[in-house]
Image (cartoon, rainbow, N blue to C red):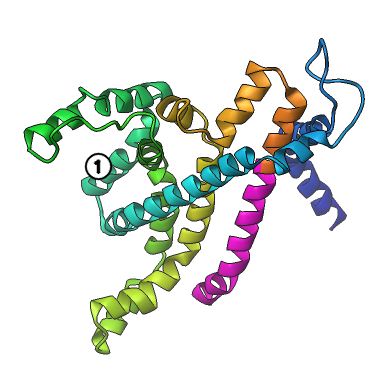
Amino acid sequence: MMRSKKLIWALALPALLLLFVFMILPITNMVEMSFRTPGSSEPFGDDYTIMHYTRILGDGYYWGVLWRSLTTAGMVTLLCLIVSYPIAWHLSRAKGFKAVFLYACIASPLMTGVLVRNFGWMIVAALNGPLNESLMALGIIERPLRLLFTQSLVILALVHVFVPFMVLPINNALRNIPQSLTEASASMGASRYQVFRDVILPLSFPGIQPGVILVYVLAVAAYVTPALLGGQMVSYMPTLIIGELTGTFQWPFGSALAIVLSCSTVLIVVVFTRLTWKLNERARA
């Protein structure tokens, strides 16, 4: 018994060491940095203060940027769920070459570099780009739309890249639903809508919940896409944080912004998990 426990700890030690070095230690350092005073000739001073948090919480601008970041991530997550569920459903029923083809299409956004992908969106959404020219040729619009540097384009680009992170866990949950359950429900007179509402949707929730959490966290922390497609016209917390850390070298204030964003995200994830816990437990029962 003791030998098995030692073996378990020996196997877990590398993972715990990596977790400590690359997660716990940096977060602890960032929390400590957020209470540092600004430096005159260095990024931070020697004393400690709460002035950075007072500045953030007392300024409506930072509240607005935080709200935009959280709500944008929420819209991205909702759109990813709406788009991903039908894809995951067809993928769970596909076999052979069709399944391989669908997996390749789903993973294709991840096979392109983030800069190349975003520059592609910039070309498509430009005033004289293919999208505006196609809409004008069809007579839908009379003059080009300003799509670049808007929140809508940022949301669309984030949905494009984060859909696979929603499809795969939902697909895994749908594949674990026994076909006999849906067949039994249909044989007892249930309509397709009733089978989906009462059987498929509850049983697929163990895949929906982690997919929603994963996409939301990734969308909140996204930096390159909002920076390139949102530009200076639309501010988000990650771009604001990077600007403070690398632009003005205000490490304490940038760290405080990062802590506020992290705490807000964790709070939302915890509330969502608590609200959906009973539904998840019911689906597993």
Residue 76: % across, % down? 43, 47
Q: Which residue is mark 1?
A: 101
Crowdedness near tag 1: few (<14), some (14–19) or many (≥20) residues, C-alpha within 10 Å: some
Q: Is residue 235 left or right of residue 84?
A: right
**For the image shown, how many numbered marks are present on the structure?**
1
In the image, residue 233 lies in the stretch drawn in magenta: no
Of all residues, the one furthest to the right in this rendering is: 47
Residue sitting nearer the eye, 95 or 266: 266
Judging depth in this view, the residue of 251 and 201 nearest the camera is: 251
Main SS type for the magenta part?
Answer: helix
Q: Is residue 249 above or below residue 175?
A: above
Q: Residue furthest top?
A: 41
Foreground of the two, 21 or 28: 28
> What is the span of residues highlighted in magenta in the rendered image?
261-285
Q: Quadrant of residue 90?
A: bottom left
The amino acid on which the numbered mark 1 sits, given as a three-letter code, is: Phe
Q: Position of residue 208 (x, y in %)?
A: 46, 60
